[in-house]
Image (cartoon, helix red, strand yellow):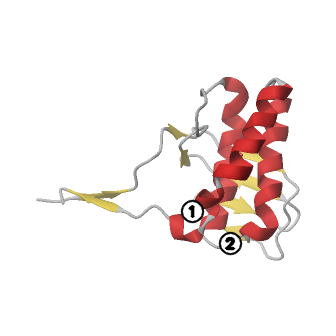
Amino acid sequence: MSSIVYRDGYKYQLQETYALQIEIQPAAPIQTDFIDLDTAGNLSILKGYAWDGPSGPTYDTLTFMRGSLVHDALYQLMRESHLDPKIHRDIADRILVRLCKEDGMWFGRAWWVYLGVKYFASFAADPADLKPPTQAPG
């Protein structure tokens, strides 16, 4: 019998590559299977990328989806040690809030989102929080 190897914890999968300019400009280009970030801050999240959407006590709304995608990708780069959380985490959190507000999120909710990730999401940027692969059947 053959088995599969997968990572759980994901709800959404990007159907088209998404690109935008961000404030994070690494010293060297970063290229992973699904995330590219160049030294000018051009971030590309490639078709097929999977993420868990907005986290915490919240609802997955259209004003939160783009921000959660970019934020999850940036936190993944921190977990994989491509970006330093001490330097880039707050910037990533502020990018999340900026995108949510650009997409129509009410200012008060966006502020709560920022406080939530600032005070309760540090584990998600920690390299010790890499999701291990699971094999099925076991």
Nearer-the-camera pick, 40 or 63: 63
The label shown at residue 33 is: 1
Return the residue found at the far bottom. 28
Instruction: Give left or right: position of 35 versus 108.
Output: left
The N terminus - image quarter? bottom left
Residue 111 at x, y percent in the picture: 81, 35
Residue extending furthest front?
119
Q: Please name the residue shown 47% across and 44% down the image.
A: 10
User: Could you say where residue 97 lies in the image, as x and y percent from the top left?
Assistant: 80, 40
Q: Between tags 2 and 1, which lies in front?
A: 2
Residue 57 percent across, percent down from the top left:
58, 33
Apparent side of residue 1 relative to residue 70 in the rendered image (left or right):
left
Q: Secondary structure at mark 1?
A: loop
Image-quadrant location for residue 64: top right
User: Quadrant of the image for the C terminus?
Assistant: bottom left
Q: Whole-percent x and y of residue 102? A: 85, 31
- Which SS class for mark 2? loop
Q: Amino acid at mark 1?
A: Asp
Are there few (<14), some (14-19), or many (20+) residues within 10 Å of tag 2?
A: some
Residue placed under numbered mark 2 in the picture:
82
Cα distance between the residues tagged 2 and 1: 13 Å
Would residue 4 be found to the left or right of residue 137 on screen?
Answer: right
Three-letter code, disc 2: His
Q: In the picture, residue 27 is in which quadrant?
A: bottom right
User: Looking at the image, which residue is at 64% across and 24% down?
Assistant: 61
Q: Against 58, is 123 above or below?
A: below
